[in-house]
Amino acid sequence: MKTILGYGTWGLSNQSYGRLKEDPSYLLKYAIKNNINFFDTAPLYGNGNVEKLIGSLDKNTRHKIKISTKCGMLPHIGFNMKQDFSEKKIIHDLYLSLKRMNRDYIDYWLLHSPNLEKINVDNIFKVMNEVKKLKIVKNFGVSLRSPFDFFKIEHLKFDCIEFNFNLLDQRALSINLIDKCKKKNIITICRTPLVFGFLSHKDILKKKFSKLDHRKHYPKKQLKIWENSKNLFMQESFYKKFGNFTQFALNFCFSNSFDYVIPGMLTKKEIDENIKISRMRKINRKNIRKIHKIYLKNEVHFWKTKKPKKV
């Protein structure tokens, strides 16, 4: 399966990057018109409003697109993520997602960034698998907090996994996570390929974040690292062979053979720019290794690259 460009819909909620300048309904339909047919969402995105947006599409359109949605996350502000992965809660989330999106089934059903040390994921997966047998969901899995969390569930059977991956967060590459998933036939979804806009926009920190912009909750030091770190890769002239820097950054994710890559797109212009990536030649393995070495030599985030011990 070749890598497919999907759409990360958190930004369509008007509650993650501030209020959109363009109509989210228009952006959704424009993306579908331009052959983007995979959408990643969650009940938490705008308190269900993004799922309702998908549900407002006409019946034929709704059923030709694939949907990934999540369960278990409770409303919160910042990084104090309140969660409930009880059987009652995740089934309730699923029922409401189906209702909001006017669908009979979900293509990909994911636990939403669970703290795997605080839940019994074995039992939860058993519940999710029973739902799968009823054909209410086609695939189930986890949207991981950290790529390292894979080692806490690799002994279990599941269908799909979502995790952060981009030029500035190559932890998954350091632990060969994508290859491990392919060997197990686990579908991979690449989240945050453009680092919340830091790889696609200039001088983000010169703009004042609105109170609805989640980026304001990150430490200032981390934001400055994200703002400046792309210069490390711009020093390498080969990136110019792959379009502009945004397309190069997205191409890096495509070239690592994910099943889906899901950038957020907040304008028609961003959709137009990103859809070109499917036609571009991919970065070869030699240059991917070169890019990874640049990453390893420089501190571009606070997360440790070293593989944690199993729990």
Image: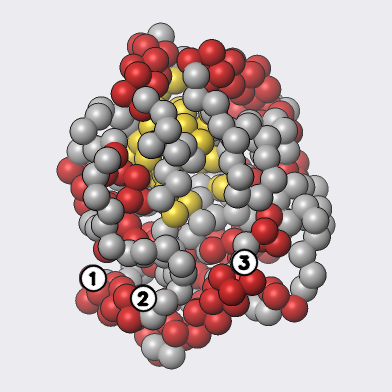
Three-letter residue code for mark 1: Arg
Helix, strand or loop at mark 1: helix
Q: Quadrant of residue 24?
A: top right
Q: CA distance from mark 1 to mark 2?
A: 15 Å
Image location (x, y in percent) of residue 198: 59, 70
In the image, residue 268 above or below residue 284: above
Q: Nearer the viewer, residue 215 or 265?
A: 215
Three-letter residue code for mark 3: Pro
What residue sits right under mark 3 in the picture?
219
Q: Nearer the viewer, residue 228 or 119?
A: 119
Image location (x, y in percent) of residue 137: 44, 20
Within 10 Å of disc 3 (Cα), the crowding (few <14, some 14-19, many 20+) is few
What residue sits right under mark 1 in the picture?
285
What residue sits right under mark 2 in the picture?
295
Helix, strand or loop at mark 3: loop
Image location (x, y in percent) of residue 243: 49, 76
Q: Nearer the viewer, residue 276 or 265?
A: 265
Q: Nearer the viewer, mark 3 or mark 2?
A: 3
Residue visible at 34% across and 45% down in the picture:
149
Residue visible at 48% across and 52% down in the picture:
191
